[in-house]
Amino acid sequence: MALSARLTTVTDDRLLPKVVDTVLGSNVLTARALTGAKKWTGGQLVGSIKYQDGLDGSSFDGFDTFSTTASNRRVKMTFQPRFYYKSVVLPQTEIDINATEGGVINLAATELAMAAQEMSDEIGTILYADGTGNSSKDFLGLQAIVDDATNAATFGGLARATYTTLNAGYTSQATLTLASMATMYNTCTSGVHKPTIILTTEAIFALYEQLLQPMERINQKVSPVKGQGMAGEAGFTSLLYKGVPMIADEKCTSGVMYFVNENFLDWYAIPSVKNKAIQYNPSSIEGNNYDNKFATVNGLGFSWTGWKVPTNGYSVVGQVILGGNLVSFDPGKHGQLHSITGV
C-alpha cells in the first residue's frame, strides 16, 4: 500500500540490523582447503618425491655377481608463494555519521566483513582454475593439480611428460555413468589411499541423483572443515558414492566431477608478521555461506592491514591479505571426469 504524507511525516522508517547477501553462493573447496592450512616455511615450498623404483632385486645362486649400480629415485618439487588482496575504502565522513545514534549497523565493520567474504568467494573461483591468471600470480587450482599435462604440462617445476607419476586421472565422459565413476574412483585409489571428497556442479550433482534408486538418495551433511566428516545443519549437503561424500560446489568448473584425496591436497598459508588475523562478527550479514560458525573467514589465514589514512583527504583505506598456495605432492591421488553433459 502507498503510505500517505499524514503517516510518513510523523513516523520514522526502521532499518533492520541485518544486511542480506543475495550474491555470494557456495564455496566448498575454499572452506575445506583453508581450514586445514599448513604453515609455509622458507622462500619456496620444496618437497622431495619418489618418482621411480630402484634397480630390481634378483634371485641368485652361489657365486652370481650382484648388481651394485646406484640409482636415483627422488626429485624435488617446488612451489612459489602467491598473494591476494582486496581493498576496503570508506570516506571518514560516512564513518562519522554512522557513529551517531542513527547508525543501526556498524559501517566499517560491515564493509570489512563483506570484503573478506567477497575475497573468499573470488579465491573460490581461482582454486578451480590453473593458476595462470593475472600473469601466473593467481593461486594454483584444481585445473592444474588434477591434470595429465593437458592443461598444465609442468607442475611443481617438473615436466609431467618426464615424471609421469605427476599425472592425475583425466577422462572425457560426456555421459555420466556409475561405471565411469567407478573407473575414475579406482584410478585414484591405491591401497588405503582413496578419494575423500567428490566435488562437482549442481547440474552434475542432479545427474548423479538420477543414477540412483529412490531408496539410495540419502542426503547427509558434511562439515565445511577439512578432516571432519558429518556435520550438523551448518554443513554442506552431500550424497555418498562408495562412502565418499559428493558435494555440489557453485564454484566448480562446468561439466567436471573431481575425485579428490584431501590427504594429498594442502593449503600452505603464509602468516603475516605485520598485520592482524581477521577477527570480526559476521552476524550483521546473512543469506550467504559465511554466516555460520563453520564457514566464516575467521581463522582461515586472512589478515587485515588496519585502516590507513591518506595525507590529502578525509578517508580511510585498508586491505585484506591472503598469502600461500594450494599444492599437491602426489597429483596421481586425484582425478576428474570432464565434459559431462548428461546421463
Image (cartoon, rainbow, N blue to C red):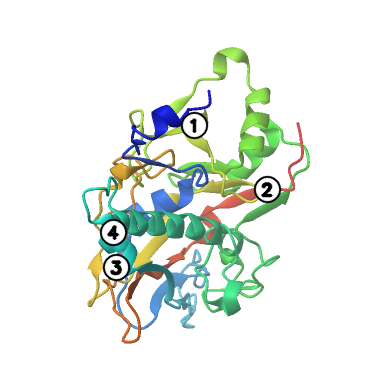
Coordinates of residue 119 in the picture (x, y in percent): 44, 60
The residue wearing badge 2 is 254
Camera-side residue of 98 and 224: 98
* Residue 176 visible (yes or no): yes
Q: Residues within 10 Å of mark 1 (few under 14, many from 20)?
A: many
**Outermost residue to the bottom:** 311
The residue wearing badge 4 is 97
Coordinates of residue 236 in the picture (x, y in percent): 44, 35
Mark 3 against mark 1, which lies toward the viewer? 3
Mark 4 against mark 2, which lies toward the viewer? 4
Label 1 vs 4, first from the N-terminus: 4
At x 52%, y 36%, the residue is: 246
At x 29%, y 73%, the residue is: 305
**Mark 3 to mark 1: distance in Å?**
34 Å
Residue type, numbered disc 2: Ser
The residue wearing badge 1 is 238
**Mark 2 to mark 1: distance in Å?**
18 Å
Coordinates of residue 66 in the picture (x, y in percent): 47, 77
Residue type, numbered disc 1: Ser
The residue wearing badge 3 is 304
**Mark 3 to mark 2: distance in Å?**
33 Å
